[in-house]
Amino acid sequence: MTALETALTRDAKIEVPLICGAMYPCSNWELVAAVSAAGGIGIIQPISLTFVGKQDFREALRAIRSVTDKPIGMNVLTEKSSKVYLERMSNWLDIALDEGVRFFVTSLGNPKWIVDRVTPFGGIVYHDITERKWALIAKKAGVHGLIAVNNRAGGHAGQKSPQELLAELGDLGLPVVAAGGIGDEQAFVDVLRMGYAGAQLGTRFIATTECKAHADYKAAILKAQAADIVLTDKLSGVPVSVIQTPYIRKVGTKAGPLARILLKNPRTKHYMRMFYSLQSAWKLREAQNRGSAYQEYFQAGKSVQGIEKVEPAGEIVRRYAEAAAKG
């Protein structure tokens, strides 16, 4: 078995054990296609395609297929926050299966309903987790692998290091993919050497020519260092990794006293999370579309430390693959 042949490459039927993670609002179809065409696997994010990209979901999938016939994946948020949302996500899932998607990355909540839906089609499900207790729920649900989100990740980061996560998940008998802090080839090689089945990258792929994020967003990633990444719970009600801009310094990173009380109350936390989700969706879309004209939030992880230029996504995949092949 070569350094590039892992449980992830076998499950996803890809050549390079590298995932371009789903990113709201940055997962445009061109980026997904470029990563998959190069031998990794791009993950489609339905809300990014339809809400930000203003595309019909099926047409976006077919646009990807016009570029590459290699495997792509789909991100499915498992949380059943509302009947309308669940119906919409279920419909997108049916379309994806109909269009030949067979690899799924789930996050939030119990993924059993997705596993049950895709298994008859030969679907493979990897679930995002930040600690062992969520991994145990996912394993019971029948997932095929885990994506371990560590404390260097962008977005909703975990609290543990890559080493700590792998140590507490290693006895579960499932492939584990590292997510967070992988901004250069050496970091990719390092996680494979640790025993991870692959790596999921997000921030690195925002700084690509195919990503439709605003040039100011990409420039902020190139300028930032790991120490500039801070956690804020003002975006979604739970800690999210963002670049510390002058705006972030001004408004702070902690939700107000009333918001914290409402987020902890079993009767009100659902509504607060929904409020935050709608608010953050708008803010993040504005950050992508208006760049420095809208300076509130640029999501990014500590992998900014290794990102030095904007380049084609396929070039990143090929360079990482070459580094891993050399060991």
Image: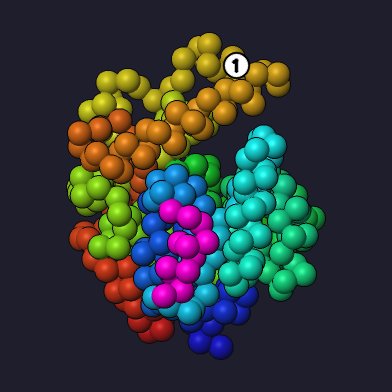
Q: Position of residue 11 (x, y in %)?
A: 62, 75
**Residue found at the very far top of the displayed protein:** 258
Q: Is residue 292 left or right of residue 142?
A: left
Q: Dot 1, crowdedness within 10 Å: few (<14), some or many (≥20)?
A: some
Q: Amino acid at mark 1?
A: Leu
Mark 1 secondary-structure assignment: helix
Image height of 315 relative to 309, above or below? below
Quadrant for residue 294, please give it.
top left
Q: Could you say which quadrant of the image residue 39 lies in?
A: bottom left
Which residue: 65% across, 18% down?
Answer: 268
Answer yes or no: is residue 153 visible.
no
| Residue for badge 1 | 262
Q: Residue 221, position in %: x, y?
A: 26, 49
Residue appearing at x 53%, y 25% in the figure: 275
245 within the magenta span: no
Looking at the image, is 233 positioned above or below residue 288? Answer: above
Q: Is residue 95 left or right of residue 285?
A: right
Q: Is residue 51 left or right of residue 196?
A: left
Q: Eyeballing the image, is 163 above or below 153?
A: below
Majority secondary structure of magenta residues? helix
Query: Seen from this angle, which residue lies furthest bottom?
Result: 1
| Left or right side of 315 for 10 | right
Choose between 19 and 57: the one closer to the eye. 57
Q: Position of residue 38 (x, y in %)?
A: 39, 77
Q: Which region of the structure is painted magenta?
A: 55-66
Question: In the picture, which quadrant includes the C terminus?
Answer: bottom left
Residue 62 belongs to magenta span: yes
Q: Using the rendered image of the protein, determine whether residue 109 is visible from the camera's viewpoint.
A: yes
Which quadrant holds the N terminus? bottom right
Position of residue 9 measured from the top left corner of the image (x, y, whole percent):
55, 77
